[in-house]
Amino acid sequence: MSLPATIRGVYVIAPTPFHADGRVDDASLDRLTDFFVAAGVDGITLLGQLGEAPKMTHAEAVAIVRRVAARTRLPIIVGVSAPGFAAMRELTHDALAAGAGGVMIAPLPSLRTDDSIVGYYRQAVEAIGGDVPFVIQDYPLTFSVQMTPAVIRRIVAENASCVMLKHEDWPGLEKIAQLRAWERDGSLRHLAILTGNNALFLDFEMERGADGANTGYCFPDMLVDVVRLAAGGERDAAHDLFDAHLPLIRYEQQPGVGLAVRKYVLMRRGIIASDTLRTPRAPLTVAARAEVDYLLARLARRDPRARL
Amino acid sequence: MSLPATIRGVYVIAPTPFHADGRVDDASLDRLTDFFVAAGVDGITLLGQLGEAPKMTHAEAVAIVRRVAARTRLPIIVGVSAPGFAAMRELTHDALAAGAGGVMIAPLPSLRTDDSIVGYYRQAVEAIGGDVPFVIQDYPLTFSVQMTPAVIRRIVAENASCVMLKHEDWPGLEKIAQLRAWERDGSLRHLAILTGNNALFLDFEMERGADGANTGYCFPDMLVDVVRLAAGGERDAAHDLFDAHLPLIRYEQQPGVGLAVRKYVLMRRGIIASDTLRTPRAPLTVAARAEVDYLLARLARRDPRARL
Amino acid sequence: MSLPATIRGVYVIAPTPFHADGRVDDASLDRLTDFFVAAGVDGITLLGQLGEAPKMTHAEAVAIVRRVAARTRLPIIVGVSAPGFAAMRELTHDALAAGAGGVMIAPLPSLRTDDSIVGYYRQAVEAIGGDVPFVIQDYPLTFSVQMTPAVIRRIVAENASCVMLKHEDWPGLEKIAQLRAWERDGSLRHLAILTGNNALFLDFEMERGADGANTGYCFPDMLVDVVRLAAGGERDAAHDLFDAHLPLIRYEQQPGVGLAVRKYVLMRRGIIASDTLRTPRAPLTVAARAEVDYLLARLARRDPRARL
Amino acid sequence: MSLPATIRGVYVIAPTPFHADGRVDDASLDRLTDFFVAAGVDGITLLGQLGEAPKMTHAEAVAIVRRVAARTRLPIIVGVSAPGFAAMRELTHDALAAGAGGVMIAPLPSLRTDDSIVGYYRQAVEAIGGDVPFVIQDYPLTFSVQMTPAVIRRIVAENASCVMLKHEDWPGLEKIAQLRAWERDGSLRHLAILTGNNALFLDFEMERGADGANTGYCFPDMLVDVVRLAAGGERDAAHDLFDAHLPLIRYEQQPGVGLAVRKYVLMRRGIIASDTLRTPRAPLTVAARAEVDYLLARLARRDPRARL
């Protein structure tokens, strides 16, 4: 389905479920899709970093998009970041044909100067086509590329097909504030801002002007609630719910091991059958699983969805 | 005072208080020292990254050590990381003469291979003298140097004067577990492990075998309590107190802006007179101050020390 | 054709010729292949960094391998470095089916510790299969990964299918010497070492124990001569020829713009029809072309092959 | 002596001579100063990266400036790059008092965005004082900071005290051309550009508009000749002399080991008594020394200054 004119709410980053032997688990993927719909998310992002995109072949990637698009009418965004434009173009074309409404593009890790970042997005848009809605992924911790608000404004100004910023700079609150100030003074057109970083700052990001979340925390249903409460002005309630989850959010946000935590909880919630990751992976130790169990037990006292 | 044979508990990272015009504020430094003593910390680390060490002249740095050492009998560790060994040697010598019991050394950011990291510490020890107790600062996020547990073991084995690991790898729980397993199997002598990262994982770090905290969170009195509770086996109580602080811990842990948060809260607590930072600095915006105030107000419902 | 038991001599890094509109230029690719054969090279490496590999689709990449393999009986090595193992496995399988004799694998740029580099090659071999001959690409300037000689020795010891080191560390002479010393003392089995870096140190690399060159300098016929002279003990003659080319070697070795220089000279030599690069590219300015022309004119006084 | 209104010619980067035991060797420093004067250089840069600046104490650094300034009337520039502005301010003040005419400042390695680089130089000028002539050191290979021509233009426009660019970007020819084009169109005031990188591209840099060299190659007398020939329009003669030295230039330009080569040749030329480096160092192996000797013997056939 095509993306809405104005993106907002929760676009959940979907993990890719595997069987214990590493094959894509279609039944779990279907359950996961249904779970996202039931949780009330507004869209789904497939094949992001935490969807283990680089570990999949082109054919596998396209099959996943096709399967999810066939099961839900929710808009779908597909990560198409690649070391070269040929692969990016090919995956974009095939993902759209399979039912995606837009794509997400991270900068090449080697980019350094403002001009080279802006130029990269210009070339990427030439490669995929100026009619394909795209999302800027601003994630310096992983990609080593730092985009100032002014660089984002230049990319947005140059490319009419830029529809959203996946914001996961850290610290990032002032960046949201600056972009919104420019929107108010007319120097930047409206840009959807959905935040990542496993929602570690979602409470304040919403208050600073974010339109929602674009992350994959193992309780996307909680993200939906926090975004709704914050958008509705129920500040304390939003923070109360958020704070209850923060110990687990923080635990899941650890680089590398975080995805294993996420899959483990989704498995314990009965949504995916196995928490298998493809190689290279950082598996959970026995001690780590026990820590997650403890965090879930503590969370269950304040959020019944954690009673597993 | 010299360092104890076995380091444990809370070694607080002290910020350096400045007047609004940037001069070192001695009166605030005295109040800060007294506050640390009253809070029950076990030691003080001066001139770490968040002590704004690179912004001070050699003479200023030594004067700070002398002043704090004159006011308390707590053991003092001084950060002496430097781009070259001449400055490191000089500051070490003068800091010890001024009353420090040991020094902390971070690796040069350009180090890459295991051998070059181990070699660097060997050369550093040659430079400062093999009789000076030193702490390894393992902080990949800031220094871009990744030390495996095996590298730490090699450094400890080579240098009898290595007395402690300031652990702030991220993720880092398995690293503590590995080092403790080696201690149990006899392949590593006992090494004090105190954790940093603004205490973001202190709850579980204590359970994995850490001996305490070596960080500067604006409520070091809470760190003392959590370390005591955890060491005493009161798991739920430790987590309850920790979780109450986690929203603020997380806020203060933001790179760059975090130190401004820390100084702002210490000022609001009446401990330092001004939250001034020296250039280069990331000052708190009005919006950020209001967010910290809100977090303090929420925290005050669960910890009366936050009622300001 | 399968790789020989002992690799030595010149394995030329082939650029990928494009038409002015960016399509692969098959006729130029054929001429290039024939030129390499006539120049006396011992093998061809396709789809390396300077073969613009990331700018090609999987189908294009495989077609290039198939075309070159159909035209020559020289052994072919194919670059299969990829952000994930799925794509690496797929390209390896298809390249071998198309006629390649082995593959070249660079480390992921994010790898830091010794263990993680060794582990990466272990996983890569699991992915492509332990029976596929592979080359380690050791190019820190581009990949930001530093492999000590000891790390290379571990990779070689663990993986019987490792047949060669593409050496382009800088500085790198002592690394060759160390590996050869270990070969002599029996702690490392024989490993073919062919050097890259646009041959900037080929003169001394041969004297330190390299088996040849694995680079793409625009006069591979000169590389063949230098390797032959050096292997035959004609030291002064090797240096005389090398030094005549050094001003151009140095000019072509510039990061980014170097490939445009290489293609420009190959075009001027009548081997490829166009010096087009795919996006992103650093095209030659008018001034730079004039500088290359001047260097060629000067070189022609000492090497008639440069008379164009 | 104060810097001239217009800087041009050769500003040689001076190594710091040490006795075998690591103490500064004053007699060698005097001989080195005299040699530079006799070689016809236009100025001297002390305490740059290859002057082993980070390995010296503040007192040693100032003493070196004082000694050289007392021996020659040549203008002196002093490297004052430091992790913090307090040390930078202090060294600047003391270096000027000791006789320096200006300072050289490299960006902090952690700087990433255009704005943060420009902001850093603004703060540095605030720290050292707006009346102190300063040189921008643009050396991405060592400092990991990439400055576009536009960033350099902003720094120059903001800071009237910016008197020179030490250019050692790689590739860098187009950067010189761009800056000179802006000078011609009036959008940039005249800026002295002296080039580094061990002179590896000095031949063409002069033709693109450089004003001279600011590097430390072991034959600064050759740099003087090449700059003079190029400035006088004797293109072929400049290249002939340059090409004769290129094999050694290239050898000395190797990161890390290069400084040992430079000191070894200066020792063999009888200018400094010992080629000792302070720790950390990359000493020359026996094989490397023999290679340098061979290069010198070959060079001596074309430049009698290499007959040692």
Image: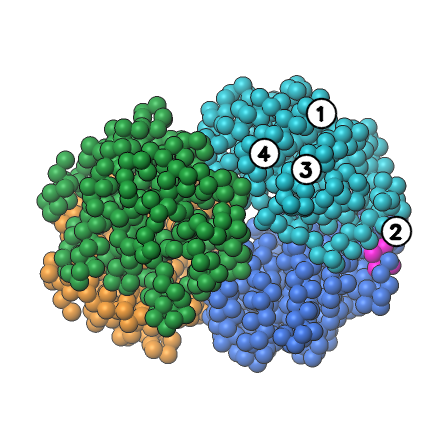
Chain colours: A green, B orange, C cyan, D blue
Sequence-first tag of 3 and 4:
3
In the image, are marks 3 and 2 on the same chain?
Answer: no
Numbered disc 1: what chain? C
Q: Position of residue B148 (x, y in %)?
A: 41, 39
> Of residues C243 and D54, which is closer to you in this image?
C243
Q: Are marks 3 and 2 in contact (CB under 8 Å)?
A: no
Q: Disc 2: which chain?
A: D
Question: Which disc is residue A128 wearing?
Answer: none
**Residue flagged by tag 4: what amino acid is it?**
Glu
Is residue A149 placed above or below A222 in the rendered structure? below
| Residue D238, magenta (yes or no) | yes
In the rendered image, which residue does mark 1 sit on? C71
Please name the residue that numbered disc 4 is placed on: C60
Q: Nearer the viewer, mark 3 or mark 2?
A: 3
The residue under label 3 is C25
Q: State the residue position of label 2.
A: D302
Q: Quadrant of the N terminus of chain D?
A: bottom right
Q: CA distance from mark 3 to mark 4?
A: 11 Å
Q: Position of residue D115 (x, y in %)?
A: 48, 66
What span is in magenta?
D237-241
- Mark 1: give few (<14), some (14-19) or many (20+) Cα within 10 Å: some
Judging from the image, what secondary structure is the residue with disc 3 in?
A: loop
